[in-house]
Image: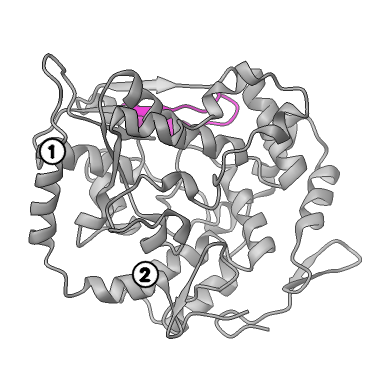
Amino acid sequence: MKYCKTCLQIDTRPNTKFIDGNCIACHYHKESIDEDFEERFEVLKDIIKKNPKKPNQFFDCIIGVSGGKDSLRQALWIRDKLKLTPLCVCFSYPPEQVSQLGVDNLSNLIELGFDTLVVASQPETWKKTLREGFLQFQNYQKAGEYAIVSCVPKIAIKYKIPLIFWGENPGLQLGDMGTVSENGYDGNNLRFMNTIAGGDLEWLTKRGLDKKDLIPFSHPTSFEFEKANIQIIFLGWFWEDWSGINNGKYSASNGLDVRKADVTMSGDITNVYALDENWVSFNQMIKFYKYGFGRVSDHVNESIRRGELTREEGIKIVEKYDGCCSDEYIETFCNYIDISKETFWENVHSCVNKELFEITDKGEIIKRFEVGYGL
């Protein structure tokens, strides 16, 4: 178990890489300090020129959105700075899952003047994928990640809009190297992100789900990408001030409603992440038990890189809040997929990394390591 020398990234993150003791995200951030972002903006303008909209076509590009901090800021920037007309595409959760914040924030984006296409899976199929994802992998969103990422290029192919804007590059800004291409803005390797790599759905068909019901969860093939000349662009590569906090502040000034829940309930120290649902909180808790880091670690790491926190300050915050989740969120999820809370915790205990944590006779999960230092 090795920590980054600069931030609190751990080498247990899937697909990560360390260079001279620093994680790839810190390495990228340090390299970016001296970057000429005006020059990068010229690169972006060249990309747009090479991907013009077709004759008689209304939309210049597509943006995957939830209405949250990143997608709202991107939509405004693309429209007002780049002077493009985007089609926003949102994969929607069912009423039992979506939060009121999610509903309100998507409405805010639409009311700001953006054409938005909302897509969704058949409700019973969605529920089954959540149940199977949790029971088989202790990750209810395993299939959902496929759907969220794949729906945007599918719409791009369907409507012949080849240019897609995405937010951050998970490789350079989080450390998931599966997404990295020859340059920092090319997002066509997004399908290789750790949480969706491969997109194999056999684990669902073996449990009785029909392939035709799983169409929303399948990603376009490489052949389909090339034939349609699809290009995904990581917009975060072009912004010097890209960060969750900055995006949250900007979007809040444009109508974004933020989370009010206590950090011990949400595990969100910023109150601006994943506003469209609450179950993500216990998914991040489970990630913490699997790998030794959760959402708070990711947020703190970003702040350390940007000089907003010292490493020592970050350690205290991670020690206090990483892995926090409200019992209320767990209960509503259990009710939705029809399992008991005992079954929920049995599954959580089954995936706990025993090298990093111990489980007491009372079922409490106690970490064996010291944040920032290791075992």
* Local secondary structure at mark 2: helix
Q: Please report the residue visible at 35 percent of the width from the left and 56 percent of the height from the top.
A: 181
Q: Quadrant of the N terminus?
A: bottom right
Marks 2 and 1: in contact by CB < 8 Å?
no
The image quarter in which residue 270 lies: bottom left
Q: At label 1, which amino acid type do we have?
A: Lys
Q: Which residue is mark 2?
A: 303
Q: Position of residue 368 (x, y in %)?
A: 73, 78
Q: Position of residue 131 (x, y in %)?
A: 72, 33
Q: At label 2, which amino acid type do we have?
A: Ser
Q: Position of residue 74 (x, y in %)?
A: 24, 42
Q: Which residue is mark 1?
A: 50
Q: Quadrant of the C terminus?
A: bottom right
Where does the magenta region start and end?
Answer: 89-107
Between 147 and 314, the residue placed more toward the observer is: 147
Q: Please report the residue visible at 62 percent of the width from the left and 25 percent of the height from the top.
A: 126
* Local secondary structure at mark 1: helix
Between 255 and 214, the residue placed more toward the observer is: 214
